[in-house]
Image (tube, helix red, strand yellow):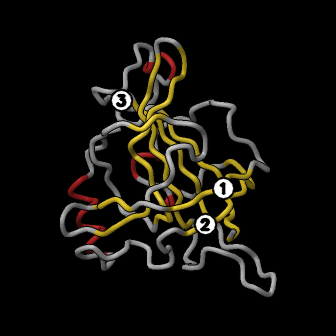
Amino acid sequence: MHVPYAALSLSLACLAGCGGQSPCNRNVHDNEKFEVTVVGQDRPPDHNLPLHGRDAPPCGLDDIHVGDRFEVTLSERVQFGGENGCQVPKCPANFPTAGTPYENASWGEFLPYVCLAKETKIQLGPQCELGRFVGLYAAGSSGRLYAESDGGVPPPFTLLRGLGGTDDQAMCSDVMSRYPKGQPGSACVDFFQVTLTKR
């Protein structure tokens, strides 16, 4: 999915203190392993919403449910925000559901991502294949990934799953009939409240 916020991405990434090959989120380490548990589905408050998600309708898919658990291992990083940006762990292609890797255009806003995956596509029917963006980011101000060892409350995270149909490699003849209110670059966006547990 191509979203025209590259300039915003770069400026916000720099404001966040990222530079060169440094990590965008210093709390996420190479080969981090954790379990994601879905605890709710809801749109976060506007100040926690990525810009491209504020006007996009829900996707209406019934593939992720409260109580679902997903095991994640972060073994790759991607450059975010251009040469002067930072490194973001890459979410696996099969998280949260199966997707097909492909080459994709850049994505563009800075959030405190645990991981992101902007280079997968999914099949919604025989004539509808859409690019998929997945971002797992901190919904609150806490820098922690997991609950405290004394059994404290887990920090809140948001799993964002957006679908779009503007890339040359993602074709869907009826995308606007499925999502008439969505923009071509972000046909629909779903938000899930999740918690992380270290494996």
Sequence-earlier tag: 2 or 3 = 2
* 85 or 70: nearer the viewer: 70
In the rendered image, residue 121, in percent from the top left (x then y), is placed at: 44, 33
Neighbour tally class for label 2: few under 14, some 14-19, many 20 plus, Cα within 10 Å: some
Relative to 14, say whether 115 is above or below: above
Q: CA distance from mark 1 to mark 2?
A: 8 Å
Label 2: element kind: strand
Q: Is residue 6 left or right of residue 64?
A: left
Viewer-nearest residue: 120 or 16: 120
Q: Which residue is mark 1?
A: 71
| Residue type at numbered disc 1 | Glu
Query: x%, y% of residue 175?
Result: 44, 20
User: Which residue is rendered at x = 56% and y = 60% of the image?
Assistant: 73
For this rendering, which residue is in front, 122 or 107?
Answer: 122
Query: Circle 2 sits on which residue?
Result: 33
Specify whether 182 is left or right of 166: right
Residue in the picture at 60% in, 57% down: 72
* Residue denoted by label 3: 184
The local secondary structure at tag 3 comes to loop
Q: Position of residue 89 (x, y in %)?
A: 43, 63
Task: Determine which quarter of the picture holds residue 104.
Answer: top left
